[in-house]
Amino acid sequence: QKDKVSVNLQNVNLDRVLTAIESQTDYRFIYKDDEIDYKKSVSIKVEKSPIEEVLQDLFRNTSIDYQVVGTQIILKPNKHIKTEVLTQKTTIVQVSVNGSVLDDNGQPLPGASILEKGTTNGATTDFNGNFSLTLTNSDAVLVVSYIGFVAKEVAVNGNENITVTLEEDFAKLDEVVVIGYGQQSKAKVIGSVGKIEEEELSKVASSSVGQQLAGKMSGVVVNQSNGQPGAASQIVIRGTGTLTAGTNPLIVVDGFPLSEGSSLNSINPDDIATVNVLKDAASASIYGSRAVNGVILVTTKQGSKNEKTTITLDTYVGMQEQSSGVELVDAYQFAQFITEARNWGYVSKDPANRSATDPNSVRVTKTINGQGIDGRELYLDFLQPYLDGKPGLTNTDWMDVAFRAAAMYNYNLSASGGNEKTKFYTSLGYFNQEGIVIGSDLKRYSANINLNSKLTDKINIGVSVKPSFTDQNALDQGSRSSGAIALVPLNFSYYSPYTDNGDINISEQIINEQREIEGVRINGTPVENLLATSTMVKDNRQQFRVFGNVFADFEIVKNLKYKISLGGDYENYTRNFYYPSSVGSYRTPAPRSDAEATQDKQTRYNYLIENTLNYDFSLAKHNFDLLAGYTFQKENIDFSSTVGTGFADDNIKNIAGASSHTTNYNLAIWALESYFTRLQYDYDAKYLFSAAIRKDGSSRFGSNNRWGYFPSVSGGWVFTRESFMPLEDILTFGKISASWGQTGNNQIGNYGSYALVTDSNYVNGNSLAAGYITTSAPNPNLGWEVASAMNIGLDLSFFHKLNFSMAYYKTNTKDLLLNVPVPQQTGYENVLANIGEMENKGLEFELSGRNFMLGNVGLGFNANLTSYQNKVLALGPGQEEIATGRDQLFVTKVGGSIAEIYGYEVDGVFKTQQEIDNTPHLSGTLTGDFKVKDINGDGKINDDDKVSKGTYTPDFTYGFGGSVAYKGFNFSFNFNGVSGRTLMDGDMASLTEAGEGFSVPTTYYFENRYHPVNNPDGFLGQPNFGNFSNSRKILRSSVVVEENNGDYIRLRDIRIAYDFSKSILERLRLSKLQLYVSGNNVFTKTDYRGWNPDGTSSNILTSGYNDGSNYPLAKTYLVGLRIAY
Amino acid sequence: CEKELIQNPNTDKVANNFYTNEAELEEGVNAVYATLQFGGNYDIAIPALGEIPGEDAYDETPANDGGVYGEIDQYNVIPQNGLIENVWRDAYKGIQRANIVLNRIEDIAYDNATTKKARIGEMLFIRSLYYFNLVRIFGDVPLVVEEIINPQDNFGQTRTPKEDVYNQIITDLTLAVDLLPNRNEDNKMRVVKTAAYTLLGKVYLTLGDYPNAYDNLIEVVKSKSHKLIPIEEVFSTENELNEEIIFAVQFASGINANSEGTDAYRMFNPTGRVEGNMTGTKGHGVLKPDFYDLYEEDDLRKGVYVDVLESGIAYSKKLAIPSTVIGDSESDWVVLRYAEVLLMLAEIENQRGNIDIAIGYLNEIRERVNLGLYEGLEDKNSVFNEIDLQRRLELVWEGHRWFDILRQNRAGEVLGVSDSNRLLMPIPAKQIATDSALEQNPGY
């Protein structure tokens, strides 16, 4: 620092000399106006003198003493001459000013500070935001500042009354984000860390924070593949980086890493303060072998020190209804469809000898080669009144039976506060959600305690405990025996859910659709009434879970802190399934010969020991933060499943009523031991650098590959802090950063490296002969997938109001854990091995602005967009592609993307035999079947004519929203969407759009089906029951896959809230009272005709495959209230 | 804490520590037998493939269950057919398991050397049975006779010519005949010497090698281990593993959560067959009414082996009505029995010109069911026709008919199948998608 001064001033006021010195050095003078006579006339002449000498000269024989503290020079009066100062003071001209300081919503800001510029003269505002200050100069300029707001300078210009409005510091340069094992000023973050706050999360009503994140953050895709209350969402951060291993991000709650894939339902979203997402490898690599899918850091609410205790009640009630693209025909249309299907099935087998007008009595005699007819070739005479259009017949809309307007409630009572040493937050929550599908619901009881206390100056301790209990009814919706959604298209609209006397109609359809006509079974669809199964089959899951940690930190020497944390997670899960004999199942009417019951029990416990050492210090403008740590975590999962059979009756609705039991038991243990260290450095918050490395050892990996190293480096430059940067009033913040790091994926199950011997029994006579045999191949080299990822980021802030950031990411994953399909002559279907390589890259953009004022109206907006490109670089040795899933149409090949959905290009239907004969076609094509484009023009239709129709992974995802604030009102909305997503719906392919007559068709299919008489212009396959050709079987999945059929844009949330004003609150003795109404998923625009455009299978290699298990999302309407006392 | 990183499975056995003693190896042997019960083997698929394409059985609901049975019935199987996929997968599962035991048994001491020899013979028999099925269904198939340690090494393996596969089968069964013990009350549930003789004889018959076929089959007669028993006892669940049975895959009802019974009852019985509250049969292998009419009025098999519903749909009664759940029938699946040995010998002797001897075997079958002695013409052709008819009537729905027609080259004549490509099933599409080194059969 500069400490030599040159001053030559004669007979000037003292303050001028002080200013001259300040201008040449880093020193600042500090004094009280009323103590120091700064107008005193002085003379001084020094040339490059040390500051100490200058001060001695200046104050020798004066009434002023000085003291140098760092770069501050404090001036105090010399006691001997106090009276002289008082005398002098009377000569000063005084101007006084009154005023108030408000925020941009016009609310007063108590505690704001007002300083007369160039002086230390100042004041703070009172509770009502008012201040008064006596100025030393009528031309003074006031500097008004408040934490979290942009400081403002206001010229007094002789005004006696001044109102100052401060704008929130949107750039939030001092905002802190949570990073692995610590936190950091947002301005200094050089990786890619997304942050989202409570306020934004709470706009979506859900039991799970996962769902609340959907569409809110660039690079983070939340696929709500199953909308059942309590079902987990798939969270994909920057694309899928694996083919076989788990895709779950690591979730760390208040420092405790949860087991991958463990339910987020056990965290009450109301307790969450912020969620930070570590998206790039450099940020995430501190979590090493578990970080490849990104890391989500959840921070729950804490109290504050010296805060009066606040009690808050948050509550809402809501109503939900289904939002799917499924539309099925009614009973009259269905009767026509099924008649067409049965007639064409009959005629098409032998068109020369058969006619659609043949009565059933004739049909049964028209055997071919001695074989009787399939009952599906009979027409259903009992449907004649429907065909005649007779009004008033049974016409059940089974969608209305399966779905309901479902209620949801949430209550959360919390208290927070603190004194000088201790702060606390505690809450009790109750959440109750009925599912939109009958028979499904979720109840959660939860609590949270966060307590922090300073034992001494050097020691802090804290406790965090989160118990919860969830009680869920969740039938497997994909089951054709008891899944309401899977049964919707199979419950025929000419049956009623109730009998004439109002009882639930049991097994009428199963029995009727298997009735005989002319001695032949009509062989319709034999499923049970979904109302009966949904109310009588029980699938209850209860989970008690408690997790949390205790920690203590000690400051060993100044700035060197040691922290030890002990964490634990305990979960007890019970599932009871009971299928009574008094309700039918697929093809089996009630009473069935036996009931079935299953009980699954799981106990999981997990403990974590974490030791960290942290040293942060500064040398002048060089700031260092060093971290070193050691952690050990171990988990036991104890699982048993008991199946009971042999029920005498339905009295005892669980395994206790069974006479025979079979139990499977499994105990799995994993352990993870880790060492890590990290250096964070910056020079003057301008040049930023960070490097870290973690070493992980995992029990999941083979003996030859047990330890892995995960390094990262990153650097950044806050160029707006350079003095040469122009336009600093416009471009208020700018940073570029780059990072590189490696992370791993260890989600491969616990004993993947062992060749396991599993049971496979035989019977000798009537006794079991226990058999055991090798069922998996050993792989002692099994290790983690390693992802090397780079990230280049740019963050800009204009006028403190408008923020823009973008990032380019590129991740290369090698040693892919691949459950490769192998040639089956080996006796194996798949083996797990570290082979394969893949690349993900894309761009992320985020733009947001807040506090744009139009008079009293505040406006804000936000938008994000992320692109995804996935490329498979290598598979197993000699392996070019993996073709799997329905009809092997899901193809993952080298040079392509994961799970591209292939299919034929369908081009209308054949209407004459002549047309078939003259056109390349698949063997077994009938008239009314699909025409296929001969893509390669070789005159044959075969596998080579299949083309890629896209992938489940979208080309890009986006979200945008806005907010408007006026006085106490706040209106906000957010949209999110995906673009470039392709889906295959299994139920559409084989049921609702197959035209096979097995199920009720969609309206789309019905309106566009081909029938030579009833719908000659149709372009979809002619209804055919009983003679569904091979050509149709091969093409039915292709025909429902239209490129980008999964695109959607959704109004994710819309909300209007009113905050009662301070004056009302004071009268009510409340600190906050907010009322709101909101809606979620109110509107979705998509062409998808299936249940859920987010739907996918859990197998990555068949991503985008949908069926009835993809429970649709709910539209939700809420009314909420927040009261704080 | 590093020792914590070594976590061995607690509830699964690990191959490295397994196969160390006789007891563990016996568990391995049981697991090889277990594959016989798999859906792609003798639970469903092999019976279906053997019977449904024949002229007597047909699929009442050909469009149901993805059409997999209907395609087989109508000779238009597609490579995506799920039943075909299962046959391929489950046969090779059984083969690999047999190979594991064969690879490891040499080093394990058995208390009784005869037992060890028997086990080797049993494994060779079961492996041969699977290859015999595969080669008859698919033609050339990859031949694997060693335990596979690293399955990825098999990428690129092509199909072995069926002649080589048959040679392996004959070598193995020849060895098995020597290793296996004679049938007795303690080993009758396992593979015994007569089973190997019967299968080897049948393999030779399939290849048209009558002398070798005769030499092996006649050993079964000579052994006196087997005889014909009253027909109502042959398939009775009270009397399983009786003296007529040479080899049967065992099933049992009501144990292991109803998972040890056979699903064949549900799959193949007419949809209209209702027995108490046992409904849900699928009609995939009913019998044609004109076939049912071939049973003469006095034939004891009528009402015992076969019956007819009021609707006129006939069906096999050889599988017991389940008492627990519909997919849990108690009946064993009979793979080889003495009646077939006699019919094969009759066929062989007739082909070799020993028509009198042939008629002698034929009469054993006829007399048991009250049909009296054969009184028709005694030329080779007429006798063949009678043997063929008795095979159909006696062995109805035991999964032989299609394979009989195939080995006799009569698919065109009997079934009207003119496209010879249809006589072999397609290699599963899934397998070709996994490894293009496997070539598809022509016509698919």
Image (cartoon, coloured by chain):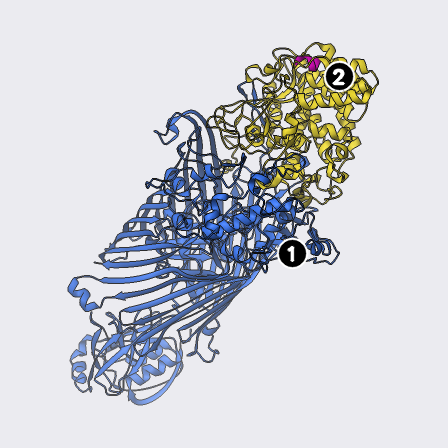
Type of secondary structure dominating the magenta stretch: helix
Q: Which chain is blue?
A: A
The residue pinned by badge 2 equals: B217
Specify whether residue B367 is painted magenta: yes
Residues A391 and A1080: in front is: A391
Q: Which chain is yellow?
A: B
The residue pinned by badge 1 equals: A911
Q: Is residue A318 left or right of residue A377?
A: left
Please check whether the numbered discs 2 and 1 fall on a single chain. Answer: no
Quadrant including the C terminus of chain B:
top right
Q: Mark 1 belongs to which amino acid? A: Lys
Read off the chain for label 1.
Answer: A
Element class at badge 2 = helix
Q: Magenta stretch? A: B364-368
Q: Mark 2 belongs to which amino acid? A: Leu
Q: x, y percentage for residue A697?
A: 52, 43
